[in-house]
Image (cartoon, helix red, strand yellow):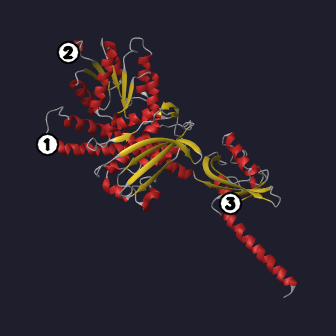
Amino acid sequence: MSPDRSGISSISKAEEELQKFKLAVENASDHIIITNENAVILYANKAVERITGFSQKEVVGKKAGTKELWGGMMPREFYETMWETIKNRKKVFTGEVQNRRKNGEIYTALASISPVLGDNGAVRFFVGIERDITKEKAIDLAKTEFVSLASHQLRTPLTAINWYSEMLLSGDVGPLSEEQSRYLKEVYKGSQRMVRLVNDLLNVSRLEAGGLIVEPVPAKIDSLIAASIKEGKFSVGAEKEIPVRFERSKEETKLAVDSELLNQVFRNLINNAVRYCSGRPNPKVEVSLDKRPVDGVNSLVIEVRDNGIGIPKLEQGRVFEKFFRASNAQKAAAGGTGLGLYISKTVVEKWGGKIWFESEEGKDTAFYVTIPLTGMVFQKGEKKLA
Amino acid sequence: MKDLNNPDKKVILVIEDEAPLLEAIKRKLELGGSSVLTATTTEQALSYLQDEKRIDLIWLDHYIFGKEPGLLFVAELKNSPKWKSIPIFVVSNAAGAEKKQAYLSLGVDKYYAKVDYRLDQLVKDIQIFLAEKKE
């Protein structure tokens, strides 16, 4: 084998390899650019032209992420964080970014920018990959708005069903026969179930629209919880009268909390506990408070324990998923929406806490929720729960 | 409306543009011993306020004709020396606690999410509120 021939063949092999990668990048559906360490564009693939409207020729040699091209639309802090991540910390930055096409149209992209380091550890290039997600965002928004609108429009007729059945059942327009009253109670119960579903859907749409407001103010936690338990007796179907035992702390716990959010989460847990131990021998629901570190954060831990149906081991990983209901829960109580714990988890994490559970099927379940002892984390946000 | 002269009967002005709900509210309040005036628009409500000598409490829905008419109406009342002390209960299906906060900061006395409350509970709350106010 002559050295000449082998040299040529390995060069052409390398070129072929390179060509393969080049073609792949050039024709990828995502927008891909390579810049030098100062963000000056060295290369742009075809998708850049298709998505931004600027030709490959136009962009090479210009600075990426500026108003001269498709960028510069985001607040200054966004770019500061981005540069800090990719240039100083030399990490990959990912984020949703608003850009402007050459024709002036605004679009939303999911961007990921990676530094490519040289042997000396210094940044040599940046690789920017962006996917145009404008359509997906619009669909998502339309979905959220639809749910929100539908929920509003559903609440008025539900109120009419509730109030008129309530008046009929209270004998406001004369006595009912036993059978009439029994049938009407079913109407009323069905309507109450629909109210819960609509309220939950409304809350999910508000949470998913982003920006939940968390406004912590100093509050007495024991009193809040006691009041919430008392108020809950009104709303959880009166037939299921299960005592909720709550041992108040010796000294009232004071913390900065958003009491509406705490109430919402706590009520979800209590309602579940009551629902899933009702009809079982000696049903029992216990609430207790404890202060201890959780994952290194000094926390108030609220525990809600019941001796109900429990959660099957195999399904425990899915309990906080939207619309998920454990198989035994579906059998025990048809009325659940599968949204309560999803909402609770989202809310608890917004306030800087944690939520988890321990459960044995057929025996008991304990849910735990934490609030940092420094108080709930303030979130400016735009929306409260419904 | 002959009851309006009876000093023992509380006069409640209900502003609600859903006719079936308005009827239920009126009936329940009357069963609870109050006199009831009903309005489906804020204009109608204002004309009652101008004509009637005595209104003890206003029951107000958020969604009545216009853009934010409920809020504007409350602002108007609270700016009027003659009407600002009439208690207002907002009973609404508008979603979101930020609405509740807007009303409370304008000075309404109570805010309820309509769909979450029994009618008898609302009527009872009004009776308790008015009884406590009298003392």
Who is closer to the viewer here, A56 or A181?
Answer: A181
- The residue at the far front in this view is A250
Q: Mark 2 points at which residue?
A: B2
Estimate the x, y position of residue A29 in percent, counting from the top left: 63, 61
User: In front here: B131 or B31?
Assistant: B131
User: Residue at 28% across / 51% down in the picture?
Assistant: A279
Horizontal and vertical percent position of residue A85: 71, 49
In the image, is residue A320 above or below residue A238? below
Q: Which amino acid does label 2 sit on?
A: Lys
Q: What element carries label 1?
A: helix
Residue B55 image position (x, y, % from top left): 31, 16
Give the alpha-carbon distance from disc 2 to disc 1, as whole Å.
Answer: 37 Å
Q: Which of marks 1 and 3 is in front?
A: 1
Question: Where A338 sits versus A214, above or below?
Answer: below
Residue wearing tag 1: A178
Q: Which residue is drawn at 35% across and 44% down?
A: A196
Q: Do labels 2 and 1 share a chain?
A: no
Q: Residue A251 carries which label?
A: none
Name the kind of residue labelled 3 in the image.
Lys
- Picture coordinates of residue A189, whole percent (x, y): 27, 44
Which comes before the other along the chain, label 1 or label 3?
A: 3
